[in-house]
C-alpha cells in the first residue's frame, strides 16, 4: 500500500495546528487539539515543544523527540484537505 510522504510542514503553535504538504501535492490541516489528551501526545500541550515538530527521514512521519511521533499515514487520515499553501 502506498502512503503519501510528507514534503513540508508549517506549524501554528497558538492553535495546535500543522499544515502538512504531501508528495502528491495535497495539503492537509492537522488539528492536534483533538490528540492532546492522548497519553502519547500530552506533552505537546507545551507550545515550545509542539513547535519543534520535524519531518522524519524519507517523509514517513513527524517527530518531536525520541518518545513522540506520528506516522504520515495517520496524519493523512486525520487531516482535513485545505487550499492553504505552505
Image (cartoon, rainbow, N blue to C red):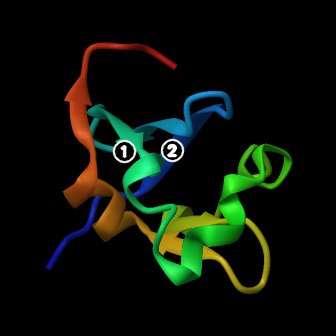
Q: Name the element at disc 2.
A: strand
Q: Which disc is residue 23 wearing?
A: 1
* Location of residue 77 with respect to 11 vertically, above or below: below
Left or right relative to 51: residue 6? left
Instruction: Evaluate whether residue 54 shows in this view.
Output: no
Residue 9 placement (x, y as % from top left): 57, 38
Residue 43 placement (x, y as % from top left): 71, 68
Left or right relative to 25: residue 81? left
Q: Which disc is residue 73 wearing?
A: none
In front: 66, or 86?
66
Residue at the disc numbered 2: 7
* Location of residue 35 with respect to 16 vertically, above or below: below
Q: Are marks 1 and 2 in contact (CB under 8 Å)?
A: yes
**Residue in the image at 67% along x and 55% along y:** 45
Q: Find the distance from the CA under tag 1 to the CA under tag 2.
A: 6 Å
Q: Quadrant of residue 34?
A: bottom left
Tag 2 or tag 1, which sits nearer the N-term?
Answer: 2
**Residue in the image at 52% along x and 20% along y:** 86
Instruction: Evaluate whether residue 40 shows in this view.
Output: yes
- Check the image and name the residue furthest to the top: 84
Q: Counting other residues with Cα less than 10 Å from the Cα at mark 1, is it few (<14), some (14-19), or many (20 or more)?
A: some
In front: 10, or 39?
39
Residue 41 placement (x, y as % from top left): 57, 71
**Residue in the image at 79% along x and 74% along y:** 65
Residue 8 placement (x, y as % from top left): 56, 38
Left or right relative to 7: residue 52? right
Q: Name the element at disc 1.
A: loop
Amino acid at each position: 500500500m502506498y502512503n503519501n510522504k510528507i514534503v513540508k510542514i508549517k506549524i501554528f503553535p497558538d492553535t495546535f495546528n500543522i499544515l502538512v504538504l504531501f508528495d502528491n501535492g495535497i495539503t492537509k490541516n492537522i488539528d492536534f487539539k483533538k490528540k492532546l489528551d492522548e497519553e502519547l501526545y500530552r506533552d505537546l500541550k507545551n507550545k515550545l515543544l509542539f513547535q519543534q515538530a520535524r519531518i522524519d527521514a524519507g517523509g514517513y512521519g513527524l517527530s518531536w523527540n525520541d518518545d513522540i511521533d506520528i506516522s504520515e499515514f495517520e496524519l493523512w487520515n486525520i487531516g482535513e484537505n485545505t487550499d492553504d499553501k505552505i
